[in-house]
Image (cartoon, grey):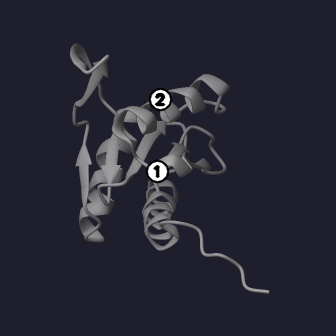
Amino acid sequence: MSLEKQPFSEEGYALMGAAFEVHNEIGGGLAEEIYQQSFEIELELRSIPFRSRYEVPVFYKERELKKRYVPDLMVYDKIVVELKSVSALLPEHEGQLINYMRISKSPIGYLINFGPIGKLEYKRFILSEFL
C-alpha cells in the first residue's frame, strides 16, 4: 500500500522550517508585526519566494468590489499564510484563512501562531477544489 503524497508538502516543510527558526530565535509572545518582519527575513534568507500583504481582488457576480482581502503572505504563489500572535488560535482565525484561500483560489493555507511562549502553534488547510 502506497501513501499518497500531500500536495505542496515539500514547500510546506520549508515554510514551517522558517517559522520554527523565527520562533527559536526570538521566542513567543511578541507583537505580530515583529513576527511578520522576522518571518519575511527568514524566507528571504532561505530563498523561499513570497509576496507580503498583497491585495487580492474580490468579486460579486463578476463585478470587482472596491474592498480587497490582504493576507499576510503568499508563498510559492500557491500557499496563503496568515500569521497570528495570540494566546490560542480560534475558529474565527481559521475562517479568516479559509476565506483568504477561497478568494485567492489557493489550495493550501497555513495559520501560524507565534503567540504562545513555549511553542509554535500552526494548522494546515487544503481546499481540494483549487488543486
Q: Residue at x 38, y 42 (%)?
A: 105
Dot 2 or dot 1: first in sequence order is 2
Q: Which residue is mark 1?
A: 107
Q: Residue at x 46, y 51 (%)?
A: 107
* Element assignment for label 1: loop
Residue 64, horizontal then vertical, whole percent = 21, 19
Residue 37: image quadrant is: top left
Q: CA distance from mark 2 to mark 1?
A: 12 Å
Q: Residue furthest top?
A: 66
Determine if residue 31 is in view.
no
Residue 46: image quadrant is: bottom left
Residue 99's disc is 2
Q: Is residue 72 left or right of residue 2?
A: left
Q: Residue at x 50, y 27 (%)?
A: 96
Rendered view: 130 above or below 85: below
Residue 68, horizontal then vertical, whole percent = 26, 21
